[in-house]
Structures are given as C-alpha cells and as structure tokens.
Image: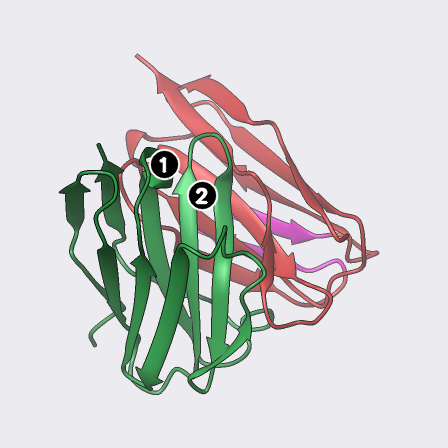
Chain colours: A green, B red
Amino acid sequence: DAGVIQSPRHEVTEMGQEVTLRCKPISGHNSLFWYRQTMMRGLELLIYFNNNVPIDDSGMPEDRFSAKMPNASFSTLKIQPSEPRDSAVYFCASSSAPGGNQPQHFGDGTRLSIL
Amino acid sequence: GQQVMQIPQYQHVQEGEDFTTYCNSSTTLSNIQWYKQRPGGHPVFLIQLVKSGEVKKQKRLTFQFGEAKKNSSLHITATQTTDVGTYFCAGPGGSNYQLIWGAGTKLIIKP
C-alpha cells in the first residue's frame, strides 16, 4: 500500500522565492496534517484539514504561509516569500480519523533550505 | 494549555544496556501513542495504548500506560544499533483533533 507521498524531497532556494510543497495522503484518510520540524523547536503542527476543510491553522507562522487541500488526494503548503528562518523539514501526515485517536502516518518529508 | 512532557532529552547507552523514556501529560489522556524517528527519517507509529494500566510488548520494547492515564513509559531491553533514533510520545489535544507531542528522547549508542 502506498504511504503518504511528499514532493519534493529536497528544496534549496534563495530567500524571497516562492516555495510549494506537495502531499498526497493515504487513500481513504480524511485527516491531513502539515508539520514543521527543527532542532530548536521540535515538531510543530502548522495546519490540520478534515475532509479537505482547514480546521485549525493557528500553527501557521505568519501570512507568508498558506495551505490548500483542493481534493481528498492532494494538499499544498506554500511559502511566499521565503526567508532563511523557514529552513526546516516539513512533514505531511494523514490519519483515518481526527488525529487524536488514530495513528498518524507521515511522509518522508521535504528538507527545505532557504539561502 | 495541555502539555506532554518527555524525559530525558537524550540517553547514551552501551549496546546491550537498557533504555527507558518517560512521558507525562498535564491532563488525563484517552490514549497515548508512541512513535520512532530514525536519524534523517520521519516519525513512524509504534503503538497506541488505551486502557488504564495497560502494558504492551513488541519484542524488546515494553510500553506502559499509567493507572491515571496521565503518564506512560517505553522501555527497551538490551539495546541494539537498530534502536537508534528519537522516540516520541503523543496524546490527543483538548479538541481531540490533533496530537500533542512530547519533545522526544534521543537514544544514542556509545561506540
């Protein structure tokens, strides 16, 4: 069975550029999460979707970050304009139910470096 | 707000020694989940504990959920190099739609 698929695996770009991260959740999972992981701040929840609807985006750092889920099999996280402090590993995870009571399945992540 | 505290932050062990990480929640949890993240990898679900006082084993790994459902532990017997990584506990947030994550315990095998 295919797991959560993220692309790209690595992204290196200059500050000020737009960055788009992509995620395909596990088929049939209706909950999708975007996380950011850094050494300093650990694993942070950015936004949570349930049935393609954003439920909580309180973790999104600022207006430069936006996320969409146009359908059940695709989500994007966009940073515009990017800054060096956005450098981190970004994970997408999906779950078969609201994430608190069911396991979350993570993608391999996107390692983002903003120069 | 709700917090999940996990200790220690790091544990250095010789191969063959035991390892334990502890997790404490500020509130009662309906369940607790454990994940493992290998260096350079992503968190991978290990197990979910639901019942008060529950103990589950996976080979050399023993997971416990406290009687009050506010604390949990993971114990690894006779560590091997394949156990290296960071172990996270996580429990449902107040709204139950997200997980509140511990900071993780990094298991390091001494050369």
- The answer to if B60 sits in the magenta stretch is yes
Q: Which residue bears the numbered disc 2?
A: B60
Q: Position of residue B96 (x, y in %)?
A: 66, 71
Q: Are marks 2 and 1 in contact (CB under 8 Å)?
A: yes
| In the rendered image, the vertical position of residue B25 relative to residue B110, given as above or below | below
- Labels 2 and 1 share a subunit: yes
Q: Residue A5, position in %: x, y?
A: 22, 67
Is A36 positioned to the left or the right of B53 in the image? left
Please rate how many residues cluster around mark 2, counting C-alpha atoms within 10 Å: few if below 14, some from 14 to 19, many from 20: few
Residue under the image location 21 percent in, 32 percent down? A115
As rendered, which of A22 and A19 lies closer to the eye? A19
Image spot of residue A50 (x, y percent) = 49, 81
- Residue designated by label 1: B83
| A67 vs A89, nearest the viewer | A67
Q: Residue furthest top?
A: B111
Q: Which residues are magenta?
A: B53-65
| Residue type beneath disc 1 | Asp
Q: Chain of mark 2?
A: B
Q: Quadrant of the C terminus of chain B?
A: top left
**Circle 1: element type:** helix
Q: What element does badge 2 sit on?
A: loop
**What is the residue that sits farthest to the right in this orientation?**
B68
Label 2 vs label 1: CA separation?
A: 10 Å
Label 1: how many Cα within 10 Å (few below 14, some 14–19, many 20+): many
For badge 2, the amino acid type reads: Arg
User: What residue is shown at x 59% (from left), y 44% (from top)?
Assistant: B102
